[in-house]
Image (cartoon, helix red, strand yellow):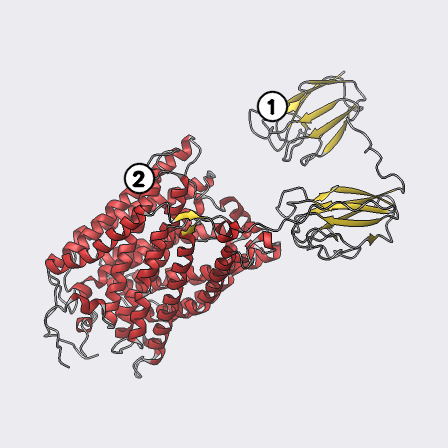
Amino acid sequence: MEEHENKDPIILTSPARMLKGILIVGITLAVGAGIVLTFFDEMYANPPPVARIQPPTPPPVEPPPAQAGTTTIAILVGAATEGNPDYDPDDGKVPLGNKIVWNNQDPIPHTATSGTGPDDPNKAKLFDTNIILGGESSDPVELTDAKEGDSIPYFCTVHPYMTSQLTIVPAGQVGAPPPGGEPAGPTIKILQGSATQGNPDFDPDPIKVKKGDKINVVNEDNTLHTITDGTAPGATAGKLFDTGFLEAGQTFSIDTANLEPREYDYFCQVHPYMQGKLTVE
Amino acid sequence: MVLEVKKPRAMWEILFSTHHTDIGLLYIILAITALMIGGALAIAIRSELFLPGNQGIIPDSNTFHRIFTTHGTNMLFLWLLPFAAGVGNYLIPIMVRYKDMAWPKLNATAFWMIPPAMAMVWLGMADFTWYASPPYSILKAPGPAAEMWIFGIKILGISSVLGAINFIVTILKMKHPDLPLMRTPLFVWATLVTSIMILVAIPTFAAALIMLYTDRLGVSGFFNPAMGGDPIAYQHLFWFTFHPEVYIFAIPAIGMMYELIPRFSRKPIFSYQSGVTAFVLLAIVGFASWAHHMYSTGMSFTEKTVFMIGTLAAVPASAMHVFNWTATMWGGRIRFRAPMSFAFGGLVLFFYAGAGGIVNTAMPLDFLTHDTYWVVGHFHLFVMGLITFAFIGMLHYLFPFITGRMYNERLAMISFWLLFAGSSVIFLTQHVLGLYGQPRRTFDYLPIEPLIIMNQISTVGAWINAAGAALLIGNLITSAIKGKPAKMNDPFELGEHYYDYTRREPHH
């Protein structure tokens, strides 16, 4: 590159010129700020047009009369939102040989497809209703190879978090009250909110049981808990009894037949500040 | 060649000029204005968060949302993009030895689309964050602010595409025939790569914006779950554009560092080829990592793994740049004038940002940091630490070229130290704040001691930054009118040729 010796004057800015430039920018900004402040609320006043269009509510769907040999399962309104109740009944009991109809009460399309989710290699092998539009019912599904006691998971391909299952029960058992109710024997409840330190955790605490009793443990909280003997996680914890991880709503039965009559400490391995006492007489 | 202009031209001549340095000047003035007013919003946000509860600086949480949405949109699209385009306008024709940009009128058009777009974004002040994520943005976000934002961003996108086409044609077609592409400065490569990325990335979001708008009107339901649409689809379209956009912001800054570091180290670049390779690599892998913003949307393990690997692929390319700069400085006779200080500070903050980024990349760890202040700290280290520092360094380096005068070196160094200290304090603290679980985009937080203390440290950092920025802008303005006339052949006394200042004025 040639040596470039410039003899041209270097044009420099004068204060007046700079002031002029600052004024141009400043006045523009001031006008803008004035508009922003004046119309601040008006700019933020109108809901989007789509919000004014009422979503078409399907006419209330009367569940079709239950025919002999047909089990109806409803897909509830709002099921498309993750976490909402979806299929009703959720753990549907289907008498052996019955046909199943899904009735979509939600305005949004859904399916009932066998399998545990979109990743299940065996999905839709047993049955698939295909898309059930809002307010419509599926074609009756017949389970040909099902046996008594089978449990068949299914899900919605549109909303894979909508999962449920069918249980095949002996023919004629439908409508019978679910067995049980309050389980017999002593019960330890893990109370809702017990994961937060300082909240009440086990109920009742302490508890006295007779040797040989089976203690029912019910996790009423919405997170994982355990009941494990000992006071803190370590090598000795869980040697005598341990429920393992109990998910929300899960139950476990502790057999006290092998426990010597004395007082035992127990705790939750997930939340070690949850401590309780158990006396075997 | 006769230089016709001996005294300053009338201002309207510059405003309506199509000459590349005039448009570059307009871009830079607009960008710095946006930096200052966007920075004022940031100070309001941080001051409001000095204590939990309502401090009265921002009246309510809706206003808070509108303020940080405007802050984010403004800083990304009205500070980073226009500034890079401004420096590109100044330097690219000089570097490829052509008289102007390939299409000067298109160039002016691209610039003049920005002020109306800026007006729409600022006058509306939408509240749905710079992601505008549905379903909120289509079902609830109040208009006309939201519509103004959508159309403002639309116009900015078109402006970017026009600018990018112009840069690509100028570099590839108007380059002097004796100048091979592999002999052009790395800043030319940076601009070329950025422009190509803009052309590939922007159309996706341009389509998504139209879909967003028709969804708001209720005539379509692409992202509206009540009409069978999928909000997650918007996130894919959005991030397919805006993850590459991160590199579109960063690569010009990296190119500027390649201008500054070798000159102030008074050594040639350690490896020109690896710089070019790293630019091209970044441009490619930039498109392979968009869904790492979406790990928590319920993707399958396989998808997450693919995007985790795609993201990690950007690490070697970024590290090549850092290594290249370090090796260039190594053994050099470094002059820590303000441009070099800003470049070096940017390098340090880039390193922190990259280290934090690797944590986000690892998907199990991302679930801990997702949507917390960690993310805020992380990406601000990029956009403030690396990019803004490189830009401000470049602004100081170009200062004699733009104004013919020298800035006040001592004030510039003080503003550097204020900005460097302030930025480190704000954003490194915010990482820890995120680990304590403070969610981002909240008006209020739990009044517990660790959160209060760290928010206060972060806010004090913001005030330090405000002082630094005020000093910076004051120094630039006063030096432009009263500074010592610069020695235009080598204003920084580096023993190198400076840009030819006669190029500042059009000689038709």
Question: Do we see residue A62 in this rendering?
Answer: yes
- Disc 2 to disc 1, how far (Cα)? 41 Å
Q: Which mark is residue A105?
A: none
- Chain for numbered disc 2: B
Q: On the picture, is A228 further left or further right than B290?
A: right
Q: Give SS at disc 1.
A: loop
Quarter of the image that includes the N terminus of chain A: bottom left
Whether B404 is drawn above or below A58: the answer is: below
Q: Which residue occupies 84% across, 37% down?
A: A175
Q: Which residue is mark 1?
A: A200
Q: Which residue occupies 15% across, 58% down?
A: A20
Disc 2 residue type (three-letter)? Val
Q: Which residue is mark 2?
A: B460
Quarter of the image that includes the C terminus of chain A: top right
Number of other residues with Cα within 10 Å of mark 1, as a class: few under 14, some 14 to 19, many 20 or more: some
Give the image location of residue A33, x and y in percent. Answer: 28, 49
Q: Which residue occupies 34% across, 39% down?
A: B58
- Chain for numbered disc 1: A
Q: Which residue occupies 29% across, 47% down?
A: B40
Disc 1 residue type (three-letter)? Pro
Whether B22 is drawn above or below A269: the answer is: below
Could you say which quadrant of the image residue A93 lies in? Answer: top right
Q: On the picture, is A256 further left or further right than A248?
A: right
